[in-house]
Image (tube, grey):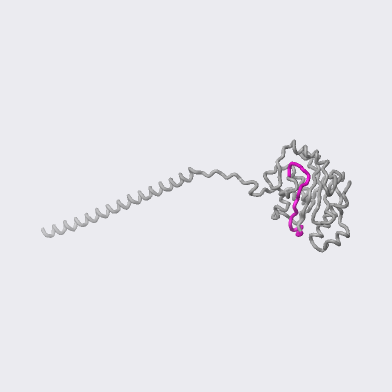
Amino acid sequence: MHLNIKVLITPTSKMGEKYNIKCPGVKRLMKEALELAEATEEYCARPLEDNLFEWHFTVQGPRGTDFEGGIYHGRILLPKEYPMHPPHIILLTPNGRFEINKKICLSISGHHPETWQPSWSIRTALLALIAFMPTPAEGTIGSLEYTPAERKLLAKKSTSWSCPQCGEIAQLLSSTAAKPLTEEEQSVLNQIAFKGEDEQTPKAPEPEPVQEPEAQVLESSESSTSFLDQLTEILVALLVGAIGIFIYRRWKVYDAVADTEL
C-alpha cells in the first residue's frame, strides 16, 4: 500500500502540538484517525497533515452494481463542532452517481444536521456512501442519473485516476478485509437514507376536484331553499289558521249579540 506521506499521516505528537487535544472535536478525530490508520479493501481515510478537520478518503465501488471494480476518491470536511455537527462529503472522482467537487446530500452529511447522531463516525459515513451509491438519485443535491453503461465505463476509468495530493488512488486501498459491521452500525445503515430538498424534488400538485365542491354547494343551497320553503308554508298555514280562528270568534260574538237584541 502506497500513501503520500506528505499529505496523509496518522496522528503524531506533532499533530498534538498543533491542536488542543482537550478539545472534544480534536480528541474524537485523533481517536478516529487511529482507528482508520490501516487501509482496507473497502475504504481508507486519513486527515491531511496540516489540517485535522479535512480528510481524504477512498472507497471501493459496491459489488454487484454498476460501480463494481471502481475506486472513488473524495474529501470530508469536518466542522469545528464535530461530532455534534455532521461532516460534508465531496466526491472528486467522476462516477456517474454524485457530482464531483460538490457537497452531496446524505442524511448523514452536513445537508441534514437534524438527522445526524454524534455516535456516528467517519467510518459510518464511508459505509453509508458505499451502500447508497447504487440507489436512485431522486433529485437529491449533488446527485446524477447516468446510465448503467456510463457508470461502468467511469468505474473502469477510475482505477487510473490520481489525486493531486494523494497520488494514484488505486494504491491507497489494501487487501485487508474491513472489520465486520456491528449491530449498531448495521442498524444505523438501515436508517440512513438520502433526502432531497423540497425545491429539488417538488411533488406534482394533485388535481383539485372542481365538480365536487360545486355539487356540495348546490346541494347545500338546495337544502337551504327546501327548508325555507317548508318553513314559509308552515308560517302561512299558521297565519291562515289564526285569521280563520279570529274571524270565527268575531262571527260568534256578532251572532251572540244579534240573538240578544232579538
Q: Residue furthest top?
A: 149
Q: Is residue 42 left or right of residue 224?
A: right
- Please name whichever residue, 24 or 78, is drawn nearer the observer in this view of the structure: 78
Residue 203, percent across and down?
Answer: 61, 45
Residue 71, percent across and down?
Answer: 81, 43
- Please name whichever residue, 191 or 231, is drawn nearer the observer in this view of the structure: 191
Residue 260, percent across and down?
Answer: 13, 60
Residue at 77% across, 55% down: 78
Q: Is residue 10 left or right of residue 189?
A: right
Q: Residue furthest left?
A: 262
> From which residue to which does the magenta span run?
80-98
Residue at 86% across, 56% down: 11
Residue at 46% across, 46% down: 216
Locate residue 33: give its quadrant.
bottom right
Q: Is residue 252 magenta?
A: no
Residue 164, percent across and down?
Answer: 83, 48
Residue at 40% across, 49% down: 224
Locate residue 158: give its quadrant.
top right
| Quadrant holding the C terminus | bottom left
- State whether residue 167 is above or below residue 250: above
Any part of residue 203 in sight: yes
